[in-house]
Amino acid sequence: QDANAQQLSQELEKAGLLNKTKIAEGGRKLRKNWNPSWVVLVGNSLMFFKDPKTQNSDSWKPGNSCPESSVDLRGAQLQWANELSSKKNVFKLRTVTGNEFLLQSDTDTVIREWYSTLQKVIDRLDKE
Ligand code: I3S
């Protein structure tokens, strides 16, 4: 493992499979399109990888495939948003740039862990 990869793996806070849809881009509402996404939290970035079936847990590492999209958590807002979907266990992540994502898991413990981990990172960045 090279130094860069080692440093990144120390900053890896969480990774896993969630259902995701983007609902706004720069404040402009988008049509929902739910898809499973491999979600990786490293430092102050939340990265989404496409088609998790063809990827593995190493795919976020340097030299491997690029994320489909990446979100800067600095100044982001998190809130439970079950009213925004017929699915259960949904929260909304809003970036400072006005991009909004819904993230969902059928497993209560999984979504609660993601929510609290993301909130901790956002709180930590707020204090910097
Ligand atoms: O909030 P909405 O618009 O009722 O969300 C549903 C739709 O986006 C639907 O797509 P079409 O309108 O293109 O058929 C999706 O398939 C649903 O999953 C969306 O609702 P949920 O409740 O699953 O977020």
Image (cartoon, rainbow, N blue to C red):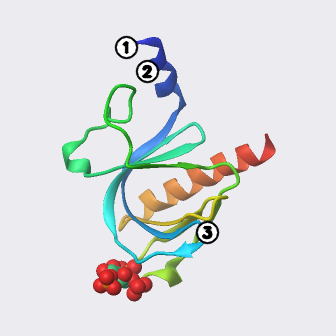
Query: Are the residues tagged 1 and 2 within 8 Å (C-beta)?
Result: yes
Q: Amino acid at mark 1?
A: Gln
Residue placed under numbered mark 3 in the picture: 79
Q: Is residue 98 left or right of residue 8?
A: right
Within 10 Å of the Cα at label 1, are there few (<14), some (14-19), or many (20+) other Cα atoms?
few
Q: Quadrant of ligand 1?
A: bottom left
- First in sequence: mark 3 or mark 2? 2
Image quadrant in which you'd find residue 100: bottom right
* Residue at the image position 35 percent from the left and 25 percent from the top: 63
Q: Is residue 33 above or below residue 6?
A: below
Residue placed under numbered mark 2 in the picture: 5
Element under label 1?
Answer: loop
Q: Which image quadrant: the C terminus?
A: top right
Measuring from the top left, give residue 33's x and y in whole percent.
35, 72
Is residue 91 visible in this depiction of the protein? yes
* Residue at the image position 41 percent from the left and 44 percent from the top: 15
Q: Say the numbered circle drawn on residue 1.
A: 1
Q: Is residue 101 above or below residue 55?
A: below
Name the foreground residue: 99 vs 57.
Answer: 99
Measuring from the top left, give residue 40's x and y in whole percent.
44, 44
Element under label 2?
Answer: helix
Element under label 3?
Answer: strand
How many dots with numbers? 3
Measuring from the top left, give residue 64's x and y in whole percent.
32, 30
- First in sequence: mark 1 or mark 3? 1
Label 1, label 2: how many angstroms apart (C-alpha)? Answer: 6 Å
Within 10 Å of the Cα at label 2, are there few (<14), some (14-19), or many (20+) other Cα atoms?
some
